[in-house]
Amino acid sequence: MMSDFKKDLKEYAKTMGVDLIGFASQERFNGVVPEENPFVIFPEGKTVILIGKRITRGALRGIEEGTNFGDYSMFGSSWLDDNFNSSMCYEMTRYLEDRGYEAVPMFPNPVEAKKMGVPVGEGKTAPNVTPDFQYAAVACGLGEIGYCGEILTPEFGPRQRWQMIITDAEIEQDPILEERVCTQCNKCAKVCPLGAFTERKTVKICGKQMEIGNIDFNLCKKCQNGAFANRLLKSAKPDRLAALCVRTCVHELDVQKKVSNSFKKPFRRHDAWSIDIYDKKRKVKVEQ
Ligand code: SF4
Ligand code: SF4
């Protein structure tokens, strides 16, 4: 049974506009490398709380139609991370600290930032710990890594962004998500005009096994189909949440009724556009 503390916290989160929330205890992070382990930042911490807010389907519309990229980059990306999610995360940390628990708010910095460790002399660098949010989403029972290489949730598929709180409050963890969201349809790979999916691989997090595509992110960095350079660290994996591959997944999960945030009309209403590696524009047939 859920404790009153957790119930009240979840209620409060809802009033703050949190769409997704999940909890994981420290043991679920045993074995995670120190540079990506949230409990290296706060060793006395007991619980990771992951909170998420949806990327509205409409925020992707301008990219899907090829008519407007700018508004997604704010409502679907920078404002969502820097304003909406951050204030929600901050209010949650205040809620916990008002009740006597330390709460560390964490922004989803790219894991590649760990390579930028601060020099501490004699050729050594202090680890710059940047938790792996994909790992945390699975560990908190919120979703799975889909074949497209992004987190899929039963609520929104690939349409969400995350922030994290590490706290010394001991809160019961959520079960690992058992249901499968990814249909393994392979459409994200087939639609990629750059052939960035090479083969498949298996990853296991907290006992959950997932089949994901092996993706050449160097090709994704050249992609002009709605992928963006990571705005925090240019050399990091690009942001693919609005790219053709992931938008194809949004459509697939809509059509297959795999997400609870459903709509009266399908996402993809006509053939999608794509640009290949030679800058040639072509049309991608809608697959229902
Ligand atoms: S498009 Fe299909 S295979 Fe790819 S991630 Fe989505 S559901 Fe999985
Ligand atoms: S981001 Fe672009 S290049 Fe990378 S997998 Fe998606 S469609 Fe292909």
Image (tube, rainbow, N blue to C red):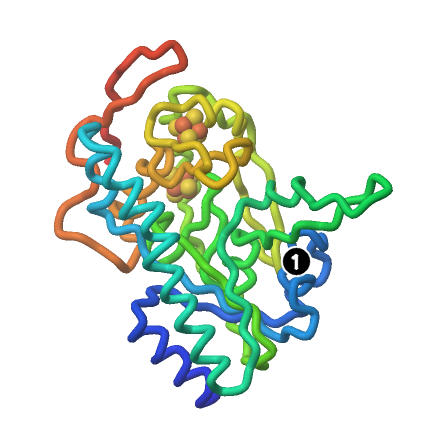
Work out whether 186 lies above or below 124.
above
Residue sitting at the far front: 121
Q: Is residue 190 visible?
A: no
Q: Residues within 10 Å of mark 1 (few under 14, many from 20)?
A: many
Work out whether 163 lies above or below 158.
below
Residue sitting at the far bottom: 4
Split into 4 quadrants, where in the image is the C terminus?
A: top left
Work out whether 222 lies above or below 152.
above
Whether residue 99 sits left or right of residue 207 in the image: it is: left
* Residue type (three-letter) at the residue carrying disc 1: Asn
- Residue at image point 54% right, 73% down: 103
Whether residue 220 sits left or right of residue 248 in the image: it is: right
Indicate which quadrant contains ligand 2.
top left
Q: Position of residue 214 (x, y in %)?
A: 56, 32
Q: Is residue 61 visible?
A: yes
Whether residue 144 sits left or right of residue 115 in the image: it is: left
| Residue that numbered label 1 is attached to | 37
Task: Confirm or reject: label 1 Cβ below 8 Å from ligand 1.
Answer: no
Secondary structure state at the residue bearing disc 1:
loop
Q: Position of residue 32 (x, y in %)?
A: 69, 55
Front residue of this view, candidates 56 and 287: 56
Q: Position of residue 152 (x, y in %)?
A: 41, 51
Front residue of this view, candidates 141 and 29: 29
- Residue at image point 25% right, 23% down: 273
- Residue at image point 67% right, 40% down: 115
Residue sitting at the far right: 122
Whether residue 254 sits left or right of residue 237 in the image: it is: left
Front residue of this view, candidates 265 and 137: 137
